[in-house]
Image: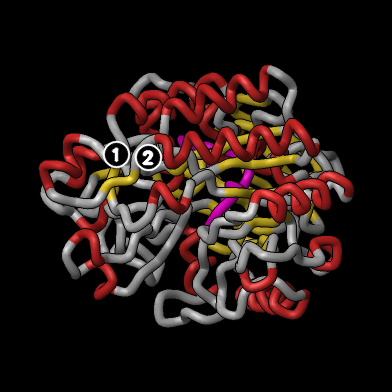
Amino acid sequence: MKLRIHSGRIIDPASGIDKTTELCITDERIISVGETPQDFTPEQEIDASGLIVCPGLVDLQARLREPGQEHNGTIESETAAAAAGGITTLCCPPDTDPITDTPAVANLIQELAQLAGNAQVLPIGAVTPGLNGEQICEMVILSQAGCIAFSNAEHPIINTEVLRRAMEYAASHNLTLLLRPQDSWLAANGCAHEGAVSTRLGLPGIPEFAETMEVTRLLTLVEQTGARLHLGPLSTARAVQMIGRAQFDGLPVSASATAHHLHLSEIDISDFNSQCHLRPPLRTQRDQEGLRQGLKRGVIGAICSDHQPHDVDAKLAPFGETEPGASGLETLLPLSLRLVEQGIMELPEVIAALSWHPAKILGIPGGTLSAGSTANICIFDPEHYWTVSPETLISHGKNSPVMRWELKGRVTHTLLAGRLVHELKQ
């Protein structure tokens, strides 16, 4: 189908475009931004007057729960939620059931995503078989099966020698590791930031240095091996400083933070709100400000959802006994746009952190509207107010820490390879 999007403000940080103009699509690709080619006759048009047209969002971390936990969500349901949030590419961590440590599981995830047809799903392969932290997976074979990067999810690789060998393997084959910086011994059974709030509430805490000590170990290994490493999601200002220094020294390290950690802090758990039980935990307001400044300076390159849908019962127990995690696909964009409203960042910078930068971290051709690129496009109304509620969320997971918040900015259209996969019903 030949499609023309006109009268919208097109923002493409990758090519420096920020102007009101038109965009033409044919054969799943963008053929022009600006003037319509003389021989182009559109079969369909989208009037984007008053709307923002930007690259489809790229989410570095989203659990879709399939295979293995379909009662919490499926690839079809969660990619539909992603499309409603303007997300066209998702990375799925390897802690599925079975674990994504074989080509068969990686292929299954991609086939189910293709059948659903709502978004591109890129599986993240396991660093160690069964996420056991004891041996190294055949990462090259998994890469050939479509795994875009490698992680051990929330399962720590305690043995530093195994982690070193994994980094050497990844470096020798130009593979990217996505690791969550958390010392499992220090985090133990904690469920909140170790500080005044957790002490007052009687909740076991996770100290700041559970993150920073692991960052130290990982950065030291990167310095030794040259492996390309992405750390996230981060939760502490000190970790941001450490990674910023490593980047200044030329280490191939990138980082991400969740949209929730950019707006919430330990204060939000004060009434034992289990919706705010996250891992890593919400930390101090100083840490929140450190994450924001790290994003502004480019130390943190990407904002992710860290989407973890749960059934209702998972959040009904006492705070420490509930499941950590939040449903974040549909609130990723509007929460990020709040940074513009609050004067932290400019709109093109936020869009870059949601599209172009995560695509660069993964090394994939995406996050741009340049001529010849695949037509993965998000169109949103920056002035549309809406309230987060179980009724307005498409995801199976209704576990949002911003439930009942009024947010500004909502996706009106999402295109995947030139095909309309979401349109907001008026």
Task: Give the image location of residue 74, x and y in percent.
Answer: 50, 76
Residue 376 belongs to the span the image colors magenta: no
Q: As drawn, is 88 to the left or to the right of 169?
A: left
Residue 282, quarter of the rendered image: top left
Q: Decide: few, some or many residues near mark 2? Use Cα within 10 Å; few <14, some 14-19, many ≥20.
A: many
Q: Mark 2: which amino acid?
A: His
Residue 111, quarter of the rendered image: bottom right
| 2 over 264 or under it: above or below | below
Q: What kind of colouring is applied to the model shown?
A: secondary structure
Magenta region: which residues? 48-62
What mark, if any, has residue 2 been given in the picture? none
Q: Mark 1: which amino acid?
A: Leu
Could you tell me which quadrant the N terminus lies in? bottom right
- The reply to whether callout 1 and callout 2 are in contact (CB within 8 Å) is yes
Task: Name the residue beneath numbered marker 1.
Answer: 264
In the depicted view, which residue is nearer to us: 225 or 118? 225
Q: Residue at x 41, y 54 (%)?
A: 328
Q: Give the Cα distance between marks 1 and 2.
A: 5 Å
Q: Do we see residue 89 in this rendering?
A: no
Q: As drawn, is 222 to the left or to the right of 424?
A: right
User: Of helix, strand and loop, which one carries label 2?
Assistant: loop
Q: Residue at x 69, y 41 (%)?
A: 229
Q: Residue at x 69, y 77 (%)?
A: 105
User: Of helix, strand and loop, which one carries label 1?
Assistant: loop
What mark, if any, has residue 261 been given in the picture? 2
